[in-house]
Image (cartoon, grey):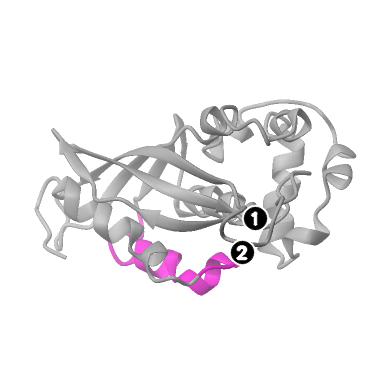
Amino acid sequence: MRRYPGLLMPALLADKFWSPFKQDTGGADLRKYGFTSTLKGIVHPSVFTSQVNGIVGGVPLLEDFFWTILTGFDIVHVGDAVEDGSYSKGVYRLAHRRPFLGWTPSSTTLEGEVTIDVPYCLHGEAGGFHGGELSHLTLRSPLVAELQKIREVPTSTLELLQNAEALKMLVALRRAGVKPPLITDRMLRSVSKKQDTWSNALGLQ
C-alpha cells in the first residue's frame, strides 16, 4: 500500500481496510479474518484514534463494530470505493446467516437468505509520522437505518439495538468466544435497559 506524509489516498485506504472481508473467510469469529493485524499495520500504535458514527475510540471500537455485525451476518461483498474529496464511499453486502438479537435466519439456502446493502464512508488522517501511519480513522455506516427497511427484522431486534447494556453484553460475549446461537434475545433483554452512547460507539446508529 502506498503511503503519503499527510493523507492516505482514499481509495487505497478503503481497499486496505476492507481487504480482510474480501477473502471468503465467512463465519462469526473476527479473529479468523485478520482484521486487527491488517488495521494495526496501517495505524500509528501510540496515537491512533477512531471515530465510528460520531463516537471516538481506538482499534477496539472498530473491532466491536465488526464483532457485532458478524454475530448475525457474513460480509459477502464489498464494492469498489468511490473517492469523494478526501473520503471514500461504497457499499458492503451482508447476508443474514446466524441468529442476531432474536432474528433467526428464515432459510439456510442461498436463495432464501436475506441480504442487506449497507453504505459506508471512510476517511483517514496521517499525522506526518515516518511511514505515513494513520493517526485517525473515521467510519460512518448506518446499519440500523438499513435494517429498519427490511420487513423481516423483528421490532424486538431493532429495540435491542437501542439497548446500551445489551450491546455491551453482546460484544463482551462475542469477544469471549461465545457462539451466536447461544446469545439469545432473552439473555440480552435481561440486562439493564439504560441507554447511553454505546450503540453509537458500535457504529449501529
Quadrant where the image shows the C terminus: top right
In terms of secondary structure, where does tag 1 sit?
Answer: helix
In terms of secondary structure, where does tag 2 sit?
Answer: loop
Looking at the image, residue 67 sits to the left or right of residue 92; the answer is right
Position in image of residue 54 (x %, y %): 44, 29
**Residue lying at 35% horizontally and 60% vertically, measured from the top left:** 45
> Which image quarter: residue 89?
top left
Vertical position of residue 19 compared to residue 145: above or below: below
Looking at the picture, tell me which residue is in the foreground, 146 or 70.
146
Looking at the image, residue 141 sits to the left or right of residue 106; the answer is left
The reply to whether residue 83 is in sight is yes
Quadrant where the image shows the N terminus: bottom left
Looking at the image, residue 129 sits to the left or right of residue 62; the answer is left
Say whether disc 1 or disc 2 marks the residue closer to the N-terminus.
2
Looking at the image, residue 68 sits to the left or right of residue 138; the answer is right
Indicate the amino acid at tag 1: Thr
Dot label at residue 28: 2
Give, as a single range, the part of the protein colored magenta: 26-46
Which residue was labeled with disc 1? 71
